[in-house]
Image: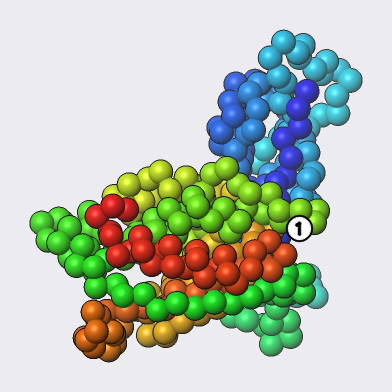
Amino acid sequence: MGQFLMPSLGADMEAGTLIEWLKSPGDAVSNGDLIAVVETQKGAIEIEAFEDGILEEYLVGIGKKVPVGTPLAIIRTKGEAPVERAVQEKAPKPEPPVPVPAATSPTPEPAPTPAIPLQTDRVRITPAALRLAQSKGIDPRTLGDIGTGPGGALTLADIERANPPSPVNPMDGMRAAIAAAMTRSKAEIPHYYLAHTVDLTAAQTFVDQTNADRPPEARLLLGALYLKAVAKALRKYTEFNGYLTDGQFHPASAINTGMAITIRGGGLVAPAILDAANLNLDDLMTSMRDLAARVRTGRFRATELTDATITVTSLGERGVDQLFGVIYPPQVAIVGIGTPREHPFAVGGAVEERLTTTITLSADHRVSDGHRGALFLRAIDKHLQKPEKL
């Protein structure tokens, strides 16, 4: 029998809340099938199976928060006999998201936290989200149609986004998780930093020509070219693509570029575009749009969070020239891209006004050094000068 465990979805996760089962006991499951939805500070995450078999039984009920590594269900592999139910502890039955109860008493008991006024309206909300709402004195019925959980249910992340930062504990929720991961990164990883100015004229011209006859939903953005150029450069500079664990660097066989995305209401995540080096620009652009849309509604997959082998973060049109990222452990590098601007630039012995940006590298000195880092940045530059070959 195999155990389906509460996964670790990053260095900043210690526990998660099960909010939905997507398979029932007796269902066949295959590697990659979605089995459950887990709620974390980053939102509702769809969790995949990593083996083939039969979902034997649930071990954790809906709404229960458990630490990373806790068995959530039993998966019976091919050839194994079914579990003898008589000797098994009966598992809790899954429950749907609980509605906010209707009013039953005109004189509620005093409570240590502000009580939610009870009316006859009903709101779909996960148990964890309801507890958080009650602890913060938030009435879920006042939040409108913002639920991102199953069937539009309000999730923990929805309540956190709706709740302004507390003056008592400003490090709640996702901000606390980000702080923990970045504190660990700065304490454990000896960063070094490089910056390189890149002429984007050829890349922008290619984008303009490609988009000339396309509808808006099919157009390319410079961001797709950035990700592809980074991915192609990583094929040669493999020491920037992988993980450092147990004191050793483990280069990754695939190139999964994490894309930093700001979450509506605060915080950010960096889920991966899987196998980015083997996607053409149109497929890459489609994946970027899909991922950004799902992240901003708080719904994405576990592998998109855990399988990133390097992170790329871009300031887009925010008007800042450069940024030096903090490495997300156990990754060993992060590439930052500033806002493109028109600048005087030397071209063939003359100075011309060109569209440029500054690409930065923050890398782990235990794995690479400035010499290789500089070559990596130059390789990204060279790929961007020939966008038709990306």
- At x 32%, y 79%, the residue is 356
Q: Is residue 322 left or right of residue 54?
A: left
Q: Is residue 75 visible?
A: yes
In the rendered image, the vertical position of residue 292 relative to residue 89, given as above or below: below
Q: Quadrant of residue 71?
A: top right
- Residue 282's spot in the image, x, y percent? 29, 50
- Dot 1: what SS? loop
In the image, taking residue 327 as reference, residue 262 lies left or right, namely left
Colour convention: rainbow
Can see residue 126? no
Q: Quadrant of residue 104?
A: bottom right
Q: In screen coordinates, is 78 left or right of 356?
A: right
Q: Hey, which residue is sitting farthest front in the picture?
A: 349
Viewer-proximal residue among 120 and 218: 218
Give x and y (percent) for residue 82. 76, 14
Q: Residue at x 86, y 28 (%)?
A: 89
Residue visible at 59% across and 38% down in the picture:
48
Task: Kindly give the residue lying farthest to the right in the view shown.
Answer: 87
Q: Nearer the viewer, residue 1 or 360?
A: 360
Report the front residue among 347 and 121.
Answer: 347
The type of residue carrying mark 1 is Glu
Q: Is residue 186 above or below residue 146?
A: below
Q: Where in the figure is residue 339, as x and y percent of width and height? A: 37, 79
* Count of residue discs: 1
Mark 1: few, some, or many residues within 10 Å (few <14, many ≥20)? some
Extreme residue in the left direction: 213
Q: Residue at x 38, y 67 (%)?
A: 381
- In the rendering, at what x and y percent does residue 169 appear? 73, 81
Q: Nearer the viewer, residue 331 or 168?
A: 331
Read off the residue under disc 1.
14
